[in-house]
Amino acid sequence: MVANRLVQLIEAHSDELAASLVERLRHSSRTVSFLKIPEDSLRQAADDLYRHLGDWLNNKTETDIEYRFVQVGTMRAEQRIPLSDFVWAMIITKESIWRFLQMQSVERVFDLYGELELIHLIDQFFDRALYYATLGYSQAERASRAA
């Protein structure tokens, strides 16, 4: 299946994608608060996501995504990363995949159906991740106000 080959390509280049993402996060005026987070920590989180993208897209359940990204949202809220910065970081994360695949498609010709299938899977995953991370933010805010 073409989508699986594209995911394997992303996973194989996870370190390169993670480095590029961290660079973009550190230089975007919309993610200035991410400068508070150690670069190694950001790179590791990005690499982990890209390296295991196939697992997230094909094997993880909605509950798995909810569990992980509520944790991520809570952690970023506790680090005092504004929600708008976090949302922009997620958008940049997804855009990084598209940029990478566009660069690769110059060298390789892939079936359009496979690319559309992958687009759907990635969009679905990131939309859910974003929703659950914002849920984590909300929970952290309520806990903070209660304390």
Image (spheres, rainbow, N blue to C red):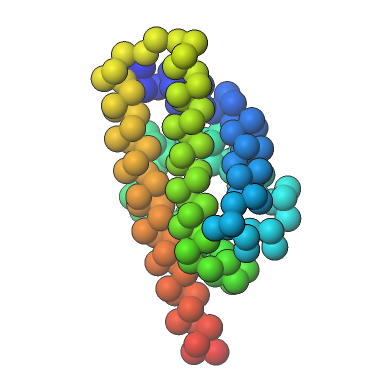
Residue 14 relative to residue 73: left or right: right
Q: Which image quarter is the C terminus in?
A: bottom right
Q: Where is residue 139 in the image (x, y as percent from the top left)?
A: 44, 74
Q: Spot the residue most to the left.
A: 113
Q: Position of residue 43 (x, y in %)?
A: 66, 44
Question: Can residue 70 be seen at all in this image of the molecule?
Answer: no
Note whether 106 is above or below 67 in the view shown: above
Nearer to us in this view, 116 or 26:
26
- The image quadrant that residue 22 belongs to is top right
Residue at image coords 47%, 69%: 137
124 or 85: which is nearer to us? 85
* Residue 32 visible in the displayed image: yes
Work out which residue is located at the far front of the displayed protein and give it.
29
x 39%, y 46%: residue:
126
Of residue 62 and residue 115, the one placed in the foreground of this image is 115
Q: Residue at x 45, y 41 (%)?
A: 94
Q: Is residue 38 above or below residue 1?
A: below
- At a point 37% along the width and 44% down the height, the residue shown is 125
Residue 56, image x, y percentages: 43, 39
Nearest the eye: 19 or 73: 19
* Residue 19 percent across, percent down from the top left: 66, 37
